[in-house]
Amino acid sequence: MVPTAAQSKLLLFRGSPGNRWRRRMPIGFTAPVLYLTILSAFLLIVAVACSGPPEAGISASATSGQAPLTVNFTNSSRNATEFQWDLGDGTAATTDAKQVSVSHEYTKVGTYAVSLTAVKDAKAKESQTAITVITVKPGPLSRLTLKPASAALKPGDTYSFSPEARDQFDNIIPDLAYLFGSVGQAGTVDVQGRFAAGTKAGVYDQGVWVEATHGQATRRATASVTVEPGALYRVYINTDSVTVGVGESLKFTATAEDAYDNAIPDARFVWRAEEGAGSIASNGEFTAGIKAGVFDSAVRVEAVRGVVTAEAFARVTVEPGPLDHV
């Protein structure tokens, strides 16, 4: 028996659970029509979303660290077709897909402003820029130096040595604690690196040293020190009394010293002989006169260094020569 129209509607209402959604469907809608309607609405939403202005977005895997610091930058921009990267240290790049991440290594200490410009239409100048900041700190201690590498001082003079610590990329490592020391008779140095020269003249190849520790690394540096003689203080002759015969010759030598008994090699000597005692050459060669006697200031030497002078004397006893006549 063929059901009537009313009976057909009743059968549809009592249909299987898999068909129950159909009874809520407005008259005239079928499944394909509903799918197309939902898809159209989704595409419309996407189209509206993509039609907005470009939105730049950038994130970094690290924002600070020691050199060398490798950072991976992720592009989270929207509504753009070109992406311009400025990595802050003079490095630039351009990508055309936001999925492309950019990786960069920083080796120099500093603060870098990294920018990503999302461009939608270059002609219309539609763009937006996002910025993130990267801070690079010095790496582990690699090299320690002491400046200056050498210094020449007079006895008792002071001088400040400056240590400088750097990592493998030549970045200066600030605010380290330093340990200073000196060797031999070069002098003394305080905790600030202020050096006071000793009184013993000489060349001290590693007269001053400094040590620093940074992390697991310890380094040492040295500087040479030359202690030069001080100001002219005195001069003396190799002998202060000598006896010679009439007309005989001998050579005198002189030494100039500072107040700490350091010889002054660049002093100039001027020799003079007492009248009647004999004569003396510029090199200290003395020749006794013909008159016998004791001459307390027979030989006189004057040491000259700059504007400072000092003098010394030697006594000469001139004895008579061999018997000549009665």
Image (tube, helix red, strand yellow):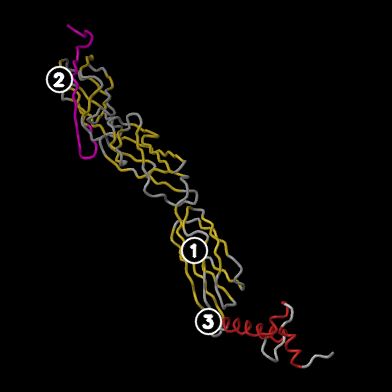
Mark 3 residue element? loop
User: Do the CB atoms of the residues marked 1 and 2 lie less than 8 Å apart?
Assistant: no
Mark 3 and mark 1 lie on one chain; the one further toward the N terminus is 3
Mark 3 and mark 2 lie on one chain; the one further toward the N terminus is 3
Q: Say left or right for 119 vs 183.
A: right
| 27 up-or-down from 146: above or below | below
- Where residue 20 appears, as percent x and y from the top left, is 70, 80
Q: Which residue is mark 1?
A: 89
Query: Of 247 and 203, which appears nearest the observer?
Result: 203
Among all residues in the image, which is located at the extreme bottom?
Answer: 5
- Where residue 167 appears, as percent x and y from the top left, is 47, 48
| 154 up-or-down from 114: above or below | above
Q: Place residue 176 in its image quadrant.
A: top left
Mark 1 residue element? loop
User: Do the CB atoms of the residues marked 3 and 1 lie less than 8 Å apart?
Assistant: no
Specify the amino acid type for callout 2.
Asp
Looking at the rendering, the stretch of residues picked out in magenta corresponds to 303-326
Q: Between tags 3 and 2, which lies in front? A: 3
Among all residues in the image, which is located at the extreme front?
Answer: 1
Specify the amino acid type for callout 1.
Asp
Q: Say left or right for 251 vs 50.
A: left
Q: Which residue is mark 3?
A: 53
Q: Place residue 51 in its image quadrant.
A: bottom right
Specify the amino acid type for callout 3.
Pro
Rendered residue at 74%/92% (across/down): 6
Q: Place residue 101 in its image quadrant.
A: bottom right
Mark 2 neighbour density, 10 Å: few (under 14) some (14–19) many (20 or more): some
Real-space Cα distance between discs 3 and 2?
110 Å
Q: Which residue is mark 2?
A: 296
